Image: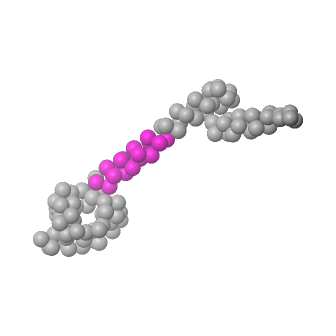
């Protein structure tokens, strides 16, 4: 059997690990053993923080909708209840955009939903 030299693959793997930790502090950016653990920890935080990002975005939408709803003469909980009763397909993200940028359209939506009772 011929001899297999694996230095090329070994160096490629180490190079890729060090590329991922570029910009990290202290030895985590240059030492492979520390870089591996840094990548693992960063990956788990990134996974969790993607969910937290969605959670905070939804909270912002709720605040925006409530502020616009108060201007339109109702409140958040009543508006959402009316939307559900009228089987409206409009979601919170779109409602918050309407409330923040297009208040007249938001008021029209509120008027239409609340008159359907």
Question: Is 111 left, or right, of 2 in this rendering?
Answer: left
Magenta segment main secondary structure? helix
Q: Quadrant of residue 19?
A: top right
Question: Is 42 left, or right, of 108 in this rendering?
Answer: right
Quarter of the image with the N terminus is top right
Q: Position of residue 38 (x, y in %)?
A: 57, 31
Residue 50 visible in the shown view: yes
Q: Quadrant of residue 7?
A: top right
Q: Is residue 27 magenta?
A: no
Q: Position of residue 85 (x, y in %)?
A: 17, 66
Residue farthest toward the right in the current orientation of the protein: 2
Residue farthest toward the left in the current orientation of the protein: 117
Q: Residue at x 62, y 26 (%)?
A: 34
Q: Position of residue 29 (x, y in %)?
A: 65, 31
Quarter of the image with the C terminus is bottom left
Q: Position of residue 108 (x, y in %)?
A: 24, 73
Q: Is residue 75 above or below residue 11?
A: below
- Total numbered circles: 0
Protein image colouring: one colour
Magenta segment: 46-62
Nearer to us in this view, 113 or 105: 113
């Amino acid at each position: 059997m011929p001899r297999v030299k694996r230095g090329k693959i070994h160096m490629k793997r180490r190079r890729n690990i060090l590329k991922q930790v570029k910009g990290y502090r202290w030895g985590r950016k240059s030492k492979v053993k520390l870089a591996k653990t840094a990548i693992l920890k960063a990956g788990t935080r990134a996974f969790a923080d993607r969910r937290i990002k969605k959670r905070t975005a939804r909270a912002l939408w709720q605040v925006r909708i409530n502020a616009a709803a108060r201007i339109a003469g109702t409140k958040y909980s009543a508006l959402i209840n009316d939307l559900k009763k009228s089987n409206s397909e409009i979601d919170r993200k779109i409602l918050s955009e309407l409330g923040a940028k297009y208040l007249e359209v938001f008021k029209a939506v509120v008027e239409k939903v609340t008159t359907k009772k």
